[in-house]
Image (spheres, grey):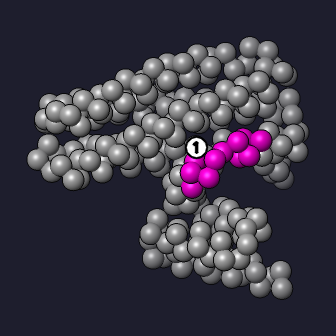
Amino acid sequence: MHKPARFDMYATIHRALRHFMTDTLTQIGRLDAGDSEASRAALDQLDTLLYLCRQHLEHENRFVHPAIEARSPGGSQRIAGEHEDHLEAIAALEAEALAVRQAPSPTADLRLYRHLALFVADNFEHMQIEETRHNELLWQGYDDAELVQIHEQILASLDPAERGLVLRWMTPALPRSERAALYAELRKQMPGEVFSAVLEGAKPWLGAQDWAALVADLDQREALLA
């Protein structure tokens, strides 16, 4: 028999971040100094990605690392150091993106793309360590109810704009069953008309097949509760 899966507070947000990073990397890779409108949109998306990356680091520093240190002293030291490196990299990318806005050129575009690619690659390895070693420490030190409580503290710290941003990139990144579970939980938390607007807002983020599946899954869950 398989052991029940432990609560993993990294899983869904990291899916969202990986999706956001890879999509943004693709957009920056397509920068064209002669297409100012498309370049502006890509650079705006990069700015938003870097904002979310900074917020994500701060949330982990504020909530997750103290929890690890409380039960496994020194356990978060490596990742905490990498967070400092990532904050420096974010600032450097923001400055480089601003320079590209002010003086676009094929050389500057390519340089930004390559530096972003290195940042994404570093983050992918970083997230793998968090999802393995950090989760091991969290699971050793806490039961699932305690981990859910920490996760809820993180969610409560998000402002509406950040919540919406996370939802935008998380929705298409999740497996079908997890996407349905997420929106079923949102439906419990929101007035009907608000949830309807949120659900309709997700339609552009999904292909036709995924959108139809989400609606069908939610209808099925509602029917089971009736």
Q: Quadrant of residue 109?
A: top left
Residue drawn at x 52%, y 68% as measured from the top left: 202
Is 121 rendered above or below residue 72?
A: below
Tell whether 208 sits left or right of 59.
left
**Front residue (pair 216, 60):** 60
- Residue type for callout 1: His
Q: Which residues are magenta?
A: 153-164
* Residue ID for mark 1: 14
| Residue 124 visible somewhere in the drawing | no
Q: Residue at x 48, y 76 (%)?
A: 209
Q: In the rendering, at what x and y percent does residue 94 appear?
A: 37, 30
Residue at image location 70% in from the left, 28% down from the top: 62
Q: Is residue 92 above or below residue 226?
A: above
- Residue 1, x across and y down, in percent: 84, 53
How far across and down, in percent of the image, does residue 193 sit?
A: 66, 77
Q: Is residue 81 left or right of residue 119?
A: right
